């Protein structure tokens, strides 16, 4: 009798493992989320993200901007109807004025459920030479929009930032909050790897 229960238990465990593995399938990074099941993984199988990682600096309008780009494996993204684990690039940054005073610093922020200041890659295109990012904006989501990084060579990236001009919150932003957009609102700004 004990052997019969063991066989049933083993069969049930194998069946559940098969269902779990099927639900967590792995696909290449550029696969459309429309074509994959919930809780799948989009993996950087061609190692396209790694070449963007590092610390990059540029000057713009008297400010020194430093980008800290890292790769985050299996970042969970919620698309409403499904949740997908995606290998993504994360940008943290510091902006200092000409006197070295820090105007904005997200380098040590923890990006959990709070999307304030977060910059995550959407995908990489053009044979891994162009990365597209979503930026959630600063206080009251001011400046949310798209950032595009293109590889110029192994040590330089070209920056393009397309902010949206409106806030996305229902209520008005308190007057005490800084709603300045410190990231460079420009195209073709060159960042050099440090």
Image (cartoon, rainbow, N blue to C red):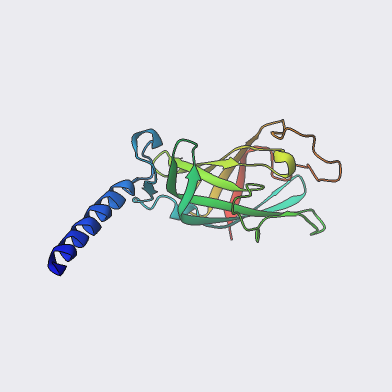
Residue in the image at 40% along x and 50% along y: 48
Count every numbered label the image shows and give the total.
0
Q: Nearer the viewer, residue 165 or 66?
A: 165
Q: Where's the N terminus, which quadrant?
A: bottom left
Which image quadrant for residue 184? top right
From this view, report whether residue 35 is shown above or below residue 157.
above
Q: Position of residue 135 (x, y in %)?
A: 61, 42
Residue drawn at the location 48% of the way across and 52% of the way down? 75
In this picture, is 41 found above or below 7?
above
Q: Position of residue 183 (x, y in %)?
A: 69, 45
Q: Quick check: 168 left or right of 180? A: left
Q: Position of residue 118 (x, y in %)?
A: 61, 48
Residue 13 vertical placement versus 32 (above, below): below
| Image point (71%, 35%), residue name | 169
User: Which residue is nearer to you in this view: 58 or 103?
Assistant: 103
**Residue furthest right as drawn:** 175
Q: Position of residue 83 (x, y in %)?
A: 45, 43
Identified at 59% across, 61% down, the residue is 194
Instruction: Pick the residue in front: 16 or 2.
Output: 2
Q: Is residue 171 above or below residue 114?
A: above
Residue 66 shows in this picture? no
Q: Is residue 35 visible?
A: yes
Relative to 10, is 46 on the left or the right? right
Residue 42 is left or right of residue 185, and the answer is left
Q: Residue furthest front?
A: 1
Who is closer to the viewer here, 120 or 191? 120
């Amino acid at each position: 009798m004990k052997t019969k229960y063991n066989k049933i238990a083993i069969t049930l465990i194998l069946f559940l493992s098969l269902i779990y593995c099927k639900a967590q399938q792995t696909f290449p990074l550029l696969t459309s989320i429309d074509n994959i099941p919930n809780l799948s993984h989009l993996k950087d199988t061609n190692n396209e993200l790694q070449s963007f990682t590092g610390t990059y600096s540029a000057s713009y309008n008297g400010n020194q901007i430093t980008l800290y780009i890292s790769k985050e494996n299996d970042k969970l993204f919620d698309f409403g109807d499904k949740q997908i684990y995606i290998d993504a690039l994360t940008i943290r940054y510091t902006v200092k004025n000409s006197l070295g005073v820090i105007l904005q610093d997200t380098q040590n922020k923890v990006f959990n459920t709070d999307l304030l200041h977060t910059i995550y890659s959407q995908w990489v295109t053009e044979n891994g030479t162009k990365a597209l990012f979503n930026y959630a904006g600063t206080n009251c989501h001011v400046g949310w929009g798209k950032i595009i990084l293109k590889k110029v060579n192994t040590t330089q990236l070209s920056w393009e930032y397309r902010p949206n001009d409106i806030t996305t919150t229902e209520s008005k932003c308190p007057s005490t909050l800084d709603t300045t957009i410190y990231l460079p609102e420009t195209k073709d700004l060159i960042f050099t790897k440090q």
